[in-house]
Image (cartoon, rainbow, N blue to C red):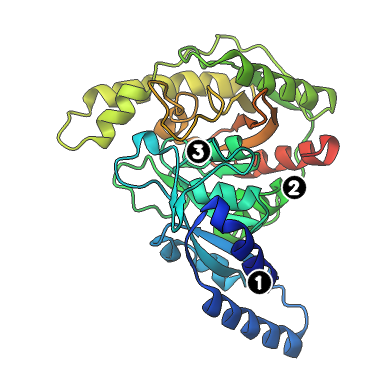
Amino acid sequence: MVAAALARIERADPQLCAFVEVWGEEALRRAGELDTRLDRRGADRSLPLAGVPVAVKGRRGLHAVGPLLAAGGVAVGATSVPGPGTPWQTWGLGARGRTVNPWRADRTPGGSSAGAAAAVAAGLVPLATGGDGAGSVRIPAAWCGVAGLKTTRGRLPSGDRTGLAVPGVLARSAADAGLWWRVVSEEPVPAEAALPVTAVWSPDLGFAGPDPEPVALARAAVERLVAAGVVRLVRPRTPLRLTDPGPAWLALRTPGVDPAGAKRVRAENDRRLAVLFADAELLLTPTAPTAPHGHEGPGNRYSTSLTWAFNLSGHPALSLPAGFGGDGCPAGLQLVAPHGRESLLLAVAGEAEARIGN
């Protein structure tokens, strides 16, 4: 498996530029050790990722993949992240140039987990680690047509002083993302979700101005979930209208800025989300407000407008593929759950794939 992944990377990465480093010799050595261990012992339940090629976000990402390596995963390389001066972390810079979207080379894959999403979407690896500070896992997952999970604030170690950035994963399926979650969280396999799961749909969270096409694609994906018996839409007692989290997010990320206003926004949005989750198990929104932009940059639009609210609040969120726009690029549906309910997100996503397909 590792040799095949390295061969795919060698063939495709000159065009994708998804990797900044490829660790071929070390990966093959590690794979050989695993082969020897399995030959001696046979199946080993302590190695649920035995031989699975894993891409690591950025050159400094190895420190975060210890549980994956202990479970038998093999790190094959470091994926691209944005270069210096990149506006809003929406693309990556690989060893051979800018990272491209596998569906259209003139479009960005999103970011900052740019190379991770491109590598998974192109089938170079089945799993790639990511980090999500404002949507950096979910946006590239949406724009590349893969699954992307952002975890609950505080559930996994993070070096971000603000607490806004948390670990996440990009995967070709909800089942693969679920396997990653079981390894890193050490939680038992969750019971199946009681279907249909109650959910509230919001196209804009009460403040964002998304384009019509991403909204329509996400809404169509919701209707497919409803028709398949995966979710049941409910009307909340109070319509969800969050305060725009952008200024608060920026204040928390800017040293020397008084965070009092940001804390007030966080508290008020947390209150409104608590009211919503008292009525429903999930919140459903488009993942990104626009289609993938070109390599010239995002312009004046915030691709984070529908995602960074949940970095501020700390809720877990998952992006699932929601179809393709008129430009041929994927769009995403974002599922948000109460704190600590990653297993619910993954169970619903798994049912969606089983009943509808990816």
**The N terminus is located in which quarter?**
bottom right
Q: Which residue is mark 3?
A: 110
Work out how far the residue at label 3 is from the one at label 2, CA to CA, in angstroms: 33 Å
Q: Residues within 10 Å of mark 2 (few under 14, many from 20)?
A: few
Work out how far the residue at label 1 is from the one at label 2, CA to CA, in angstroms: 32 Å
Disc 3 element: loop
Q: In front: 209, or 179?
A: 209
Whether 292 is drawn above or below 193: the answer is above
Q: In front: 273, or 257?
A: 257
Which one is earlier in the sequence, the residue at label 3 or at label 1?
Answer: 1
Q: Residue furthest bottom?
A: 40
Whether 232 is drawn above or below 155: the answer is above
Count of labels in the image: 3
Q: Which residue is mark 1?
A: 2
Q: Residue at x 63, y 17 (%)?
A: 213
Q: Residue at x 64, y 23 (%)?
A: 280
Q: Which residue is mark 2?
A: 191
Whether 215 is drawn above or below 336: the answer is above
**The C terminus is located in which quarter?**
top right
Q: In front: 140, or 12?
A: 12
Which one is earlier in the sequence, the residue at label 3 or at label 2?
Answer: 3
Is residue 50 something that shows in the picture? Answer: no
Drawn side of residue 315 relative to residue 120, left or right: left
Q: Of the residues shown, which amino acid type is indicated by label 1?
A: Val
Disc 2 element: loop
Disc 1 element: helix
Q: Residue at x 48, y 30 (%)?
A: 307
**Given this view, does label 3 or label 2 mark the residue nearer the observer?**
3
Q: Of the residues shown, which amino acid type is indicated by label 2?
A: Ala
Q: Residue at x 77, y 78 (%)?
A: 43
Which one is earlier in the sequence, the residue at label 1 or at label 2?
Answer: 1
Q: Position of residue 87 (x, y in %)?
A: 35, 34
